[in-house]
Image (cartoon, helix red, strand yellow):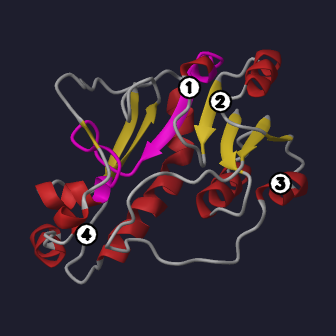
Amino acid sequence: MILFAYNFPHRKTQDFIFRCVYHSIKIDLIVGENFKKLNLPKSTIRTKIKNGALIKTSDLAARFEIPYLNADHNSDELVKKLHQIKPRLGLIGGARIIDQKIIDCFSTGIINFHPGILPEVRGLDSMLWAILNGIDQGVSSHIIDRKVDAGSVIDIQKIEINRDDTIFDISEKLYSKQLDMIWDTYQKSLNDDFLDINFEGTKSYSKMPADLEQKLSIAEYIDSKGS
């Protein structure tokens, strides 16, 4: 299994490595990509807690004796390496859009965890779009393809919302759910056990504009969905 990661201290990258090691999922290679600045507007709402105590990805790879490659995820260097390894599965623990030439190197595919229920909520700011549209919150694991947050869906699990939750609680529950789904998703992928999901007619959301962010009724959403 190939883990796509970031070549700098990153919470999801770190936790995905820990979970794979915990579940004895053999990582044949960690591919750490350098930081890239994205040309996206800054959000007016903070949805994630600030965290620290993170470990460099290369140091984690060394500690667990996992082969490590610092390379762009869409580089010819990685294509050449993957042709040597001939991997069945990949796992995204931190990545931007991955090109088709990389996807084609995997016999089964590359697993992504999307913090939204597919196909209703695809794309960026899925938690916020779900709030705006009154959709339940959950995580979908799927095999990526050239479309955004599409491909073969492996599993979908909703999260429970309590009436005293905040937007930070929802965000943390979505993140924790991704970690909890790694083992079952991995096993289902090995068995080609996919859900029958139709993406026809669905759309992918872009970054939520600031004016819509300011119109979100987060407290009302939590009250309507909370138990």
* Residue at which label 1 appears: 99
Q: Nearer the viewer, mark 3 or mark 1?
A: 1
Q: Are marks 2 and 3 in contact (CB under 8 Å)?
A: no
- Identify which residue is drawn at 79% across, 37% down: 29
Marks 4 and 2 in Cβ contact (< 8 Å): no
> Vertically, is 120 above or below 215?
above
Q: Residue at x 71, y 37 (%)?
A: 72
In the depicted view, which residue is nearer to us: 2 or 159? 2
Quadrant containing the C terminus is: bottom left
Residue, x 18% and y 65% (percent of image)? 211
Measure the C-alpha gap from mark 3 to mark 1.
24 Å
Real-space Cα separation, disc 3 to disc 4, in angstroms? 36 Å
Q: Residue 39 at what x, y percent from top left?
A: 47, 51
Name the residue that disc number 4 marks: 161
**Residue interval drawn in magenta:** 102-127
Return the disc, 3 or 4, that comes first in the chain's sequence: 3
For the residues bearing labels 1 and 2, Cβ distance under 8 angstroms? yes
